[in-house]
Amino acid sequence: MIDIIGAIALGALLATVPVVLTELASITRRTRLMLLAGAAMSSIAIVGVAAAGGFLQKATGPVPGVVIPFALILVAGVVAWLQSPRFREIVFRIPLSALIAINAARVLGVFFVILYSVGRLPAPFAQSAGFGDILVGILAVPLAIAASSAAVPESVIAAWNALGIADLVVAVSLALMSAAGTPFRVFTAGPDSGATLGALPWAVIPTLLVPLYLLIHFGIAVRLRAARTAPSRTALGATAIPG
């Protein structure tokens, strides 16, 4: 039952985030459709590999399979940022409050806690990832509301953003250190994190959602930096991108 509920919740999140971000980016319909098509194809490919067992430890040897799409998405996002002025413009068109609000969905970290309680995820990974995500998600709601009216200091947003990044980095590290059959394993007691996170529906978390949220945090960080150097609020973006 928990797998079915998780599949519905995670599927809805994967379908909603790209639509919301592209809708708020003030881009043309053609650009929006291209970005959504790319996101959909990536999701379908990863779900297909996960369904075939391609992310399980036996299929990828000593390296957890979920690391591959995780790294590819991060690298693709960073390369796009560095090489494409248009991509940077799109990021700057999304309201900062929206980038923060997207993180509210991380309250779904409660699934980690539930999976731990039924013996499917190990400690300390499950508690750290679960409660960390819940905290970041809860704080995102009032922070996004305040940011929408510029009623919060940038230092507060920066502190929350650092917390969100730290939560993801620690969670990824603990997951690797809890994966059986890899040279990274430190925590040998309890279940194998790779067995659960390498299978559907949970495989979409490390392969799609974690890198996506890390890139969102990166976007927030560069927006805050730009706001400090150009306090005219152009960093918040509001105009359409031609083409």
Image (cartoon, grey):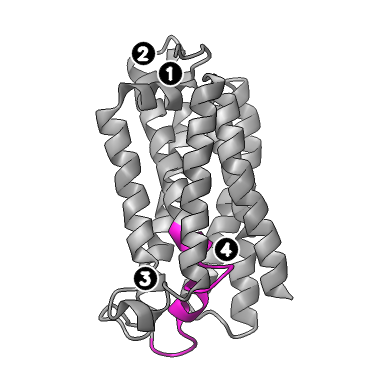
Q: What's under tag 2, amino acid-wise?
A: Ala
Query: Do the residues under discs 3 and 1 have CB atoms within 8 angstroms?
Result: no
Residue, disc 4 = 131
Q: Residue 65 appears at what percent x and percent y?
A: 36, 70
Query: Which residue is found at the position 64% from the left and 55% from the top?
Result: 11
The kind of residue on which mark 4 rests is Phe
- Does any portion of residue 167 appear in the rendered image? no
User: What residue is pinned by disc 1?
Assistant: 235
Pick whichever of labels 3 and 1 is earlier in the sequence: 3
What is the crowding at mark 1: few (fewer than 14 residues within 10 Å), some, or many (at least 20)?
Answer: many
- Is residue 62 shown left or right of residue 140? left
Whichever of callouts 4 and 3 sits on the residue coming sooner in the sequence is 3
Q: Which residue, given by chain and number where applicable, does mark 3 sit on?
A: 65
Q: Position of residue 48 (x, y in %)?
A: 50, 64
* Residue behind mark 2: 230
Q: Nearer the N terminus, badge 1 or badge 2? A: 2
Q: Which residues are magenta?
A: 188-207
Q: Is residue 10 above or below residue 139?
A: below
Q: Secondary structure at mark 1?
A: helix
Tell me which residue sits at (42%, 72%) in the image: 55
- Sequence-wise, which precedes: disc 2 or disc 4? 4
